[in-house]
Image (cartoon, helix red, strand yellow):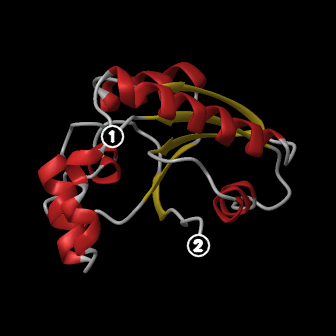
């Protein structure tokens, strides 16, 4: 069985599920999904990303996102939805919410599960990517397995 650690920041849509579950052909796959509530962290970087992508309306509303404990409940629901969608394809799927130190948790999960790869599935983060501060860039130097960066689909894709 091929084990992937899947880092996400929003619930998986059907196109994302199909993408990650078919990456390795017919080989059975298992996922450990790590979901980090965005909340208050990196708010300025997200606003700059929105401006760079021409999504000015989103940039204006960056301060409207839930913070702290308020961000955990929607993240938990998003994680449960994503795990269910992965399991419905026949894949194994477990997961957890990461509230602090995502790269430390990722490194530990990769080691504990003997994962074969890490898949970072996020929206484009131009500013973070340019400065190599995005999850995938930072994880490549820490986890000891291949790290694949994919862009998540939105509900309207």
Q: Earlier in the sequence, mark 1 or mark 2?
A: 1
Nearer to us in this view, 137 or 116: 137
Give percent across and percent down for residue 86: 75, 44
The residue positioned 85% from the left and 44% from the top of the image is: 88
Query: Are the two marked residues, 1 and 2, in contact with CB atoms closer than 8 angstroms?
Result: no
Badge 1 local density, few (<14 within 10 Å), some, or many (20+)? many
Give percent across and percent down for residue 35: 47, 35
Does residue 61 show up?
Answer: yes
- Residue 38: which disc? 1
Looking at the rendered structure, the secondary structure element under dot 1 is: loop
Does residue 107 show up?
Answer: no
Question: Disc 2 designates what residue?
Answer: 156
Nearer to us in this view, 123 or 91: 123
- Residue 5: which disc? none
Which of the image's four quarters has the N terminus?
top right
Q: Compared with residue 140, is residue 155 higher up or lower down, i.e. above or below?
A: below
Nearer to us in this view, 120 or 38: 38
The residue positioned 54% from the left and 66% from the top of the image is: 154
């Amino acid at each position: 069985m091929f084990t992937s650690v899947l880092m996400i920041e929003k619930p998986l849509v059907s196109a994302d599920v199909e993408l990650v579950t078919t990456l390795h052909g017919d080989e059975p796959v298992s996922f450990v999904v790590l979901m980090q509530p965005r909340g208050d962290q990196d708010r300025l970087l997200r606003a700059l990303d929105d401006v760079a992508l021409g999504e000015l309306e989103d940039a204006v509303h960056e301060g409207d996102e839930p913070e702290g404990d308020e961000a955990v409940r929607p993240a938990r629901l998003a994680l449960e939805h994503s795990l269910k969608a992965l399991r419905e394809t026949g894949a194994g799927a477990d997961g957890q919410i990461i509230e602090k130190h995502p790269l430390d948790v990722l490194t530990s999960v990769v080691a504990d599960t003997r994962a074969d790869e890490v898949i970072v599935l996020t929206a484009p983060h131009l500013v973070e990517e340019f400065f190599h501060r995005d999850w995938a860039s930072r994880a490549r130097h820490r986890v000891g397995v291949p790290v694949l960066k994919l862009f998540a689909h939105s509900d309207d894709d």
